[in-house]
Image (tube, rainbow, N blue to C red):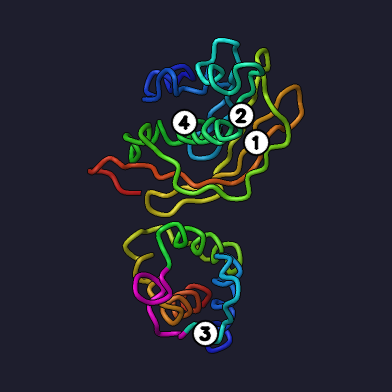
Amino acid sequence: MELQKYLDHFKHRYPFLFIDRLIEVVPGQSCRALKNVSMNEKVFVGHFPDRPLMPGVLFIEMMAQASIMIFASEHNYLDAQHGVLAHVDKVKFLKTASPGDQLIIDVSLDGKFGKLAKFKGTVSCDGAVMAKGSFTVSLPRNPAGRS
Amino acid sequence: MQQLEQEIKELIIERLNLEGMSADEIESDAPLFGEGLGLDSIDSLELVLGIEKKYGVKIQDEELGRQVLSSVASLAEFIAKKRG
């Protein structure tokens, strides 16, 4: 599948789509994606009016959205695009992101059981890790498909 | 089998961060989920990954997984059988 096709199938939209470009997707294994932080981000209206900073919780959402891409092309997970966060574990926020930053999101699968899949991920900028941690996503499955 | 059950109890406590709990407090035949130890679906994924890492035994089928994860005794039996 062409990389941009994944985004076409993706259900998240403005103002809650935090992936601008897919760099690499290895189905069932890993995903590398890119997010450009713009002064026009809706979140900067409130966080903060005098100093625009990307909230740490959105780093988690970026990693979760990238993880969903790993399963978006799999037959048994046709509804994976509606995946939601189920658990967040040991996430660290090491640096803040602001307008102009180009973020690279890397996630890889740790393992899955049933509809739950656990991942490790990082968000980095200019080679420096800004956030890292583990998280679990619940991936709704096609009723006809079983993992 | 008793040794394996003891190891599994320690793995459950460590992997699921059940702080303040000792292996002796987990009964081998008691249900791990629901009314027993009170584990949830997120815990089941953690346990499946922990068992795979420690024993090299994969639990992929969800139905089978539910049966295997029902108690420490059923987990020990499954792991012992898989390891031959």
Looking at the picture, how far across and down is residue B80, in whole percent?
50, 79
Residue at screen point 61% across, 29% down: A105
Q: Return the residue at label 4.
A: A69
Q: Return the residue at label 3.
A: B25
Residue at screen point 45% across, 57% down: B42
Crowd class of label 3 (few under 14; some 14 to 19; many from 20; radius 10 Å): few
Disc 3 residue type?
Glu
Crowd class of label 2 (few under 14; some 14 to 19; many from 20; radius 10 Å): many
Alpha carbon separation for disc pair 4 and 3? 42 Å
Looking at the picture, how far across and down is residue A64, in whole percent?
50, 36
Return the chain for callout 2. A
Q: Nearer the viewer, residue A53 or A122?
A: A53
Disc 1 residue type?
Thr
Q: Is residue B41 left or right of residue A96?
A: left
**For numbered disc 4, what is the local secondary structure?**
helix
Span colored in magenta: B27-38
Crowd class of label 4 (few under 14; some 14 to 19; many from 20; radius 10 Å): many
Q: Return the residue at label 1.
A: A122
Please tell me whether residue A45 belongs to the stretch shown in magenta. no
Looking at the picture, how far across and down is residue B77, in whole percent?
44, 80
Mark nearer the viewer, 3 or 1: 3
Sequence order check: which comes first, mark 1 or mark 2?
2
Alpha carbon separation for disc pair 3 and 1? 38 Å
